Image (cartoon, rainbow, N blue to C red):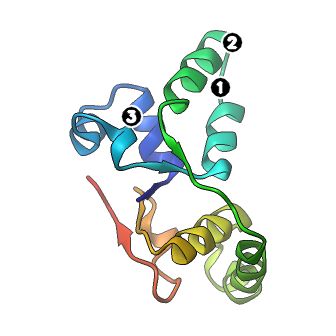
Amino acid sequence: MLVDSSVVIDWCNGSPAAAAFAGVSPSSTWMLHPVVEVEILAGARNRGELRRFAATLDHLAPARVAPADFDHCRAFVKRHTLSHGLGWPDCLIAATALRLGVPVATINDKHFRIIRGLKVIRPY
């Protein structure tokens, strides 16, 4: 499954709910989208937090973005940004998840539920 930044940040910060969702080894079930990785690293408040986030994220399997994902992202932006406030990063994550046939795990499920055919998991 692709895991959105909301869940990964909670996990990095030691949230019991996120840890329970992660189970024994999130690296075996979680895929990290490059957009999520960049969002998390860019949100670090200091060098120590940046190093901690980077070290944690290195253990997650990367999800590779394909050129077609950008085409679908663009279509989602045109269709949903004004009507639902869906941002391009979430559109790209959704496009990649649909191509890979995997669900998106997120706390912000309203951002993804409008994408037809996308399975969304609200983990806690």
What residue is pinned by disc 3?
Answer: 11
Q: Is residue 40 left or right of residue 22?
A: right
Residue in the picture at 77% in, 86% down: 78
Q: Are marks 2 and 3 in contact (CB under 8 Å)?
A: no
How far apart are the two marked residues, 1 and 2, measured between alpha carbons? 7 Å
Name the N-terminal-most of marks 3 and 1.
3
Q: Does 91 sit left or right of 112 as displayed? A: right
N-terminal label among 2 and 3:
3
Q: Given the image, on which type of amino acid does mark 1 rest? A: Ala
Check disc 2 and report its element: helix, strand or loop: helix
The quadrant where residue 37 appears? top right
Q: Secondary structure at mark 1?
A: loop
- In the rendered structure, the answer to whether residue 105 lies left or right of residue 62 reads left
Establish if 33 lies above or below 28. below
Among all residues in the image, which is located at the extreme top?
48
In the image, residue 58 lies at what x, y percent? 55, 30
Indicate the quadrant where residue 121 lies. bottom left
> Disc 2 to disc 3, how far (Cα)?
19 Å
The crowd level at tag 2 (other Cα within 10 Å; few <14, some 14-19, many 20+) is few
Secondary structure beneath label 3:
helix
Q: Amino acid at mark 3?
A: Trp
Q: Position of residue 101 (x, y in %)?
A: 46, 75
Q: Is residue 34 above or below residue 12?
A: below
- Marker disc for residue 47: 2
Give the residue pinned by disc 1. Answer: 44
